[in-house]
Image (cartoon, helix red, strand yellow):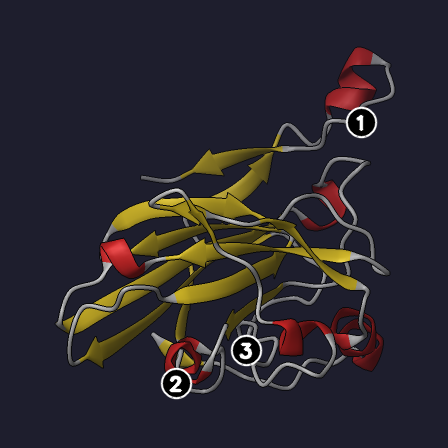
Amino acid sequence: MVKINLIMKHLFFLFILFSFPGLSYSQSVKESNEKININPALLSSTWNAQWITCPEAPARGYGVYHFRKSFSITEKPTHFIIHVSADNRYKLYINGEEVGKGPARSDLYNWNFEIYDIASRLSSGKNSIAVLVWNMGVDGPVAQISNQTGFLLQGDKKAEEVLNTDTSWKVLHDIAYKPCAIEMGSILNSYMAIGAGDAVTG
């Protein structure tokens, strides 16, 4: 695992995604029949979390990445709300259990994020959060809007900001994955809009 390079090379990406109301949420999560709403302050000011990536990752190339952080809490909380997004896509795991995926398909002027209340998945003491992020790059579906590989997590309030994306996160580039079926358009003599597939070396 290597420390994450926080310097994103394209300031336009940061400007668009941190400009409000351009960053929009796609869902809210219900816990015990209670609707969980986003902290209003997050819709009217810049987030403390930073977009992070993998140091050796090609900004717009194909890649699969494992982000991870360990953290401790003194007692099991009633609510623990986080807001998550990625370019292109992610799967979120808390203590080894998948809890969600996203983001909803976006454009550079309206980038979506998901809201999760992960309190029920936490325990007092040490916990772990892991996120699988992938970018299909130039081999992605035609409908997939993208700028460059990135991952973002913002805690809803002060207590949850322990998980904000910053230099405390670790990342691993999973080189077992490669794009495949990238020549199907020419093979079938057809226009292909679905994008490539994944070949995995086990």
Between the residue at mark 1 and the residue at mark 3, the CA separation in whole angstroms equals 30 Å
1 or 3: tag closer to the N-terminus:
3
Q: For mark 2, does the 10 Å Cα neighbourhood hold few (<14), some (14 to 19), or many (20 or more) residues?
A: some
Q: Residue 2: image x %, image y %? A: 39, 79
Q: Which residue is mark 1?
A: 193
Quadrant in the rendering for residue 189: top right
Name the residue tied to disc 3.
Answer: 55
Q: Residue at x 38, y 40 (%)?
A: 201
Return the x and y of residue 137 as percentages of the image width and height.
70, 51
Residue 36, placed above or below residue 20: above
Q: Secondary structure at mark 3?
A: loop
x, y percent for residue 59: 69, 67
Identify which residue is drawn at 15% across, 75% down: 75
Residue in the picture at 76% in, 54% down: 146
**Label 3, residues with CA under 10 Å away: few <14, some 14-19, many ≥20:** some
- State the separation of the CA atoms marked 2 and 1: 38 Å
> What amino acid is labelled 3 in the image?
Pro
Q: State whether residue 64 appears in this view.
A: no
Q: Nearer the viewer, residue 94 or 202?
A: 94
Left or right of residue 68: residue 110:
right
Q: Is the Cβ of the residue at disc 2 closer than 8 Å to that at disc 1?
A: no
Closer-to-camera residue (159/6): 159
Q: Quadrant of the C terminus?
A: top left
Identify residue type, mark 2.
Answer: Ser
Task: Please say whether residue 133 is visible from this viewpoint.
Answer: yes
* Residue ID for mark 2: 168
Q: Is residue 86 left or right of residue 16?
A: left
- Residue 79's tag is none
Res. 148 image quadrant: bottom right
Q: Nearer the viewer, residue 201 or 51?
A: 51
